[in-house]
Amino acid sequence: MSEPIEPKAKVLFRVPNEDGTAEVETLWATPLGDDRYQLDNSPFYAYSVSWQDIVYAPFRPDEGFPTFERVMSKSGNRTIRVLFDLPVETDNTSEQVMKGLIALGCDYEGANQRYVSVNIPSGVELESVRQYLIQCKATWEHADPSYAELFPDEM
């Protein structure tokens, strides 16, 4: 007999913009009870959260979703995001960068062929990934940990 499929939920994240507005991102998650959710995908806009983190997100009627308040438990995964000039296609430079990230032990989700959220598992050195992307002259950003979390003295 097969296992029952666990229900999924969407957890809402508000990502502040510099002008005081906010972007909304919803991430798939597995409900764990007591307003706790385990994230089932990598963020494309939210910072300081990664795949499989457990977050506290009570349902907010005004939002219509469980809404992120805080991380309760880190998974050990980290997130960076890469923006490509060329869409990732067979044998182009963008695909070569992605193949290199995979060879380092990373996996990814693509918002589209130019914008990718890269998961760095706990066994992969963040510094190795950083140095690889710098060497490739890629356009990328720290998402979890954020740049400000990594380099607070530079902010």
Image (cartoon, rainbow, N blue to C red):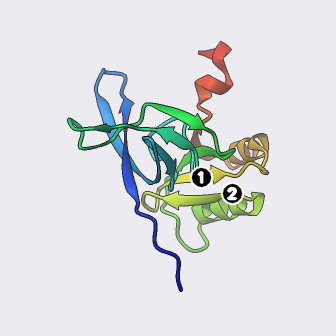
Q: Is residue 105 above or below residue 143?
A: below
Q: Residues within 10 Å of mark 1 (few under 14, many from 20)?
A: many
Q: Position of residue 97 (x, y in %)?
A: 65, 58
Q: Residues within 10 Å of mark 2 (few under 14, many from 20)?
A: many
Q: Disc 2 marks which amino acid?
A: Cys
Q: Which residue is mark 1?
A: 118
**Which residue is rendered at x = 47% and y = 74% of the image?**
4
Tell which circle, 2 or 1, labels the residue nearer the N-terminal end: 2
Q: Is residue 71 above or below residue 30?
A: above
Q: CA distance from mark 2 to mark 1?
A: 7 Å
Q: How many discs mark residues in the rendered view? A: 2
For residue 17, side relative to residue 54 (left or right): left
Give the number of the disc on residue 106.
2
Q: To which quarter of the image does residue 111 belong?
A: bottom left
**Which residue is rendered at x = 59% and y = 44% of the image?**
80
Q: Position of residue 84 (x, y in %)?
A: 52, 53
SS type, badge 2: loop
Give the number of the disc on residue 49.
none
Q: Disc 1 marks which amino acid?
A: Val
Single out the residue that lies furthest toward the bottom: 1
> Pointers 2 and 1 in contact (CB under 8 A)?
yes
